[in-house]
Amino acid sequence: MMAQSELQPHELDALRLLEADAIRMGSLVLQMVSLATRMVLDDQESLVDKVMAWEIEVDSAERNIVERVLQTLASNGFSQYDLPFLSATLCLVNELEKIGDEATKLASRLQKLQGEFPYEMHDLLREMSTLAQGNLRESLRLYSQYSQEAARGVVDRDDAVDLAFKTSRNLLVGMMRDDPERSRQFLRCIEVFHALEHVSDRATDIAKRIETCYRPFVKLS
């Protein structure tokens, strides 16, 4: 969320472009999570190649944005009112890169299952993916439209993802007891749900870190 500042037009343009590129990076990461779960839900294992390719793009975007933020700080091409925005940008892209890694792990684990993801777990996978993507989407909105209430909402909604993960894990542990010969398969399924939980955890970290960036400074007496 950029502040109104007394910068030169070219300096404002540079900050606006920075904001747009960070949001574009977030959109790409969101699509990576969506595609990874669609590998199972839509029976499209070939989507793994696109997820892997996008990870490279996400890593490149993070390096580029971090470099530009540091250059802006070094050149003093900003006002004091832009410091929260620049700090939030660094926090955002750092966490987005980690979420991209989780999406890649998710796709890789689903690929290793070779179409043997239990059908009875599809609804839980869909639910958890929707919840995790929703939290990530709201965290991205915080970056450009920050509010403390919205930030707290992301943190609170993460509890629903944690609950969904515990439910899926308990069901899969029960399947392992009933069919120990397929324990390896069920263990990989637990890892799939765990990756989605991490996506939501990272989204929550984005909300918390952006909240810290925009929290008013407290004067010490």
Image (cartoon, helix red, strand yellow):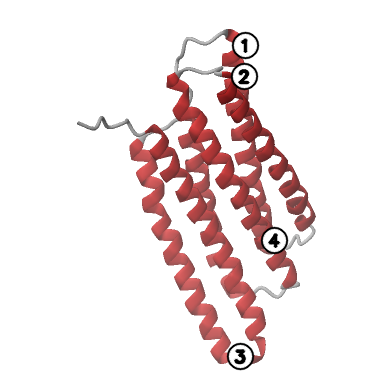
Would you call the spot at circle 3 few (<14 residues within 10 Å), some (14-19), or many (20 or more)?
Answer: few
- In the image, residue 159 sits, relative to residue 56, either above or below, namely below
Residue 65 visible in the displayed image: yes
User: Which mark is nearer the camera, 4 or 2?
Assistant: 2
Would you call the spot at circle 1 few (<14 residues within 10 Å), some (14-19), or many (20 or more)?
Answer: few
Amino acid found under the numbered disc labelled 4:
Ala
Could you tell me how far apart the alpha carbons at marks 4 and 2 are, in whole angstroms? Answer: 35 Å
Amino acid found under the numbered disc labelled 1:
His
Amino acid found under the numbered disc labelled 3:
Asp
Quarter placement of the C terminus: top left
Task: Please give left or right for residue 193 compared with residue 152 in the image.
Answer: right
Q: Which mark is residue 10?
A: 1
Q: Say which residue label 4 marks.
A: 107
Q: Nearer the viewer, residue 8 or 162?
A: 8
User: Which corner quadrant of the image does residue 119 belong to?
Assistant: bottom right
Q: Give the image location of residue 211, x and y in percent.
A: 39, 39
Task: Please give left or right for residue 19 compared with residue 48 in the image.
Answer: left
Q: What residue appears at the point 62 percent right and 57 percent down from the top-left corner?
A: 102
Task: Please give left or right for residue 80 compared with residue 91 in the image.
Answer: left
Would you call the spot at circle 4 few (<14 residues within 10 Å), some (14-19), or many (20 or more)?
Answer: many
Could you tell me how far apart the alpha carbons at marks 3 and 2 are, in whole angstroms? Answer: 58 Å
User: Which mark is nearer the camera, 3 or 2?
Assistant: 2
Q: Nearer the viewer, residue 172 or 99?
A: 99
Q: Say which residue label 2 marks.
A: 14
Q: Say which residue label 3 marks.
A: 179
Q: What residue appears at the point 47 percent right and 22 percent down from the top-left corner?
A: 82
Could you tell me how far apart the alpha carbons at marks 4 and 1 are, in whole angstroms? Answer: 41 Å
